[in-house]
Amino acid sequence: MVDAGVYRDGRLLDRPHDLPATYACLREHRGAMAWIGLYRPDPAEIVSLAEEFDLHELAVEDAIQAHQRPKLERYGSTLFVVLHAARYVDAAEQVEFGELHVFVGPDFVVTVRHAQSPDLADVRRRVAQDVDLLARGPEAVLYAILDAVVDGYGPVVAGLENDIDEIESEVFRGDPAVSRRIYELSREVVDFQRAVRPLGAILAALSAGFTKYGVDEEQRKYLRDVADHVTEVDERVESFRAALRDILTVNATLVAQRQNEEMKALSEASNAQNEEVKKISAWAAILFAPTLVGTVYGMNFDHMPELHWALGYPAALAAMGAVSVALYLVFRHRRWI
């Protein structure tokens, strides 16, 4: 047990140090309300609360196992609410989520946290300073908790918006790691939306019971204000998902464009290289003809055609020149030279 307080008419009567003392104090003061805060409790503590406040076994099982979706369940006169708080960690540029279970009965509120967020100590201090609010009973405490969770979404929205702005800049800079960041941020936005969207149904269910359970008009105004904030956050988160989809499409287009440009550059380089190879090959062929003739007549044989012919040397030079000119004209015609 992290904290406990017994209140009557909005004022603190006692702060018991353990669960049995809290039960005893609540029985001693008629019309009082106990607010018990637990952080990652032992199953034995949950079982003790279930026996004292007659909590439903299904709700108790959910509170022990955790990993529940946000929801609102009513078991007789007891409400069981599961909330997912969120906070933005600036250093890591990530969103952390925390699960919170709330039992609300006629004379008690039990909060079971499975993560550090939200910090309910601040909620308790704020509510304790508002005697009129606390005097409205357990449902007023539930409102304060809902309000704190939804208020905690504000910095998350701002952090995600800043991350999206940074990603847009990285996309147009051509950062190769931006695709992974888009994917990771998309996952965070989806998880955040899973935490926020069910709150609309939870608040709608609470509103539906205003008349039946005699919730006063001031309390209704507070819950409607929280519902408005939830709607606003949900709309912003949906716009983030749309923006990330658009960014992913733009990034894919830019990557494809850069790849096309690279392929074009490689193709142009290859074409230029082919042209150089053609030129080298053409000149090599042209030089090969005289070399061949000169090589043949450079062999040391006594009996060779035209070896002692007076016009042999000019004829050989003429043959070399004719073949070279012919090859040059052919390669020129084919634009190899």
Image (cartoon, helix red, strand yellow):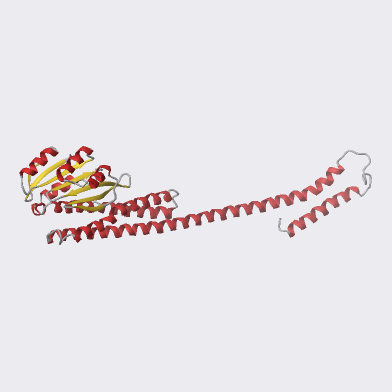
Along the horizontal axis of the image, is 61 left or right of 215? Answer: right
Q: Nearer the viewer, residue 122 or 207?
A: 207
Q: Position of residue 63 (x, y in %)?
A: 24, 44
Q: Quadrant of the N terminus?
A: top left
Q: Residue at x 40, y 51 (%)?
A: 183
Q: Quadrant of residue 231?
A: bottom left
Q: Is residue 276 above or below residue 50?
A: below
Q: Nearer the viewer, residue 91 or 198?
A: 198
Q: Position of residue 229 (x, y in %)?
A: 23, 58
Q: Nearer the viewer, residue 124 or 140?
A: 140
Q: Nearer the viewer, residue 283 or 176?
A: 176
| Number of marks in picture | 0
Residue 89 visible? The answer is: no
Q: Is residue 54 above or below residue 333?
A: above
Along the horizontal axis of the image, is 28 left or right of 321? Answer: left
Along the horizontal axis of the image, is 324 left or right of 94? Answer: right
Residue 125 visible? The answer is: yes
Q: Quadrant of the C terminus?
A: bottom right
Along the horizontal axis of the image, is 222 left or right of 88? Answer: left
Q: Position of residue 249 (x, y in %)?
A: 44, 58
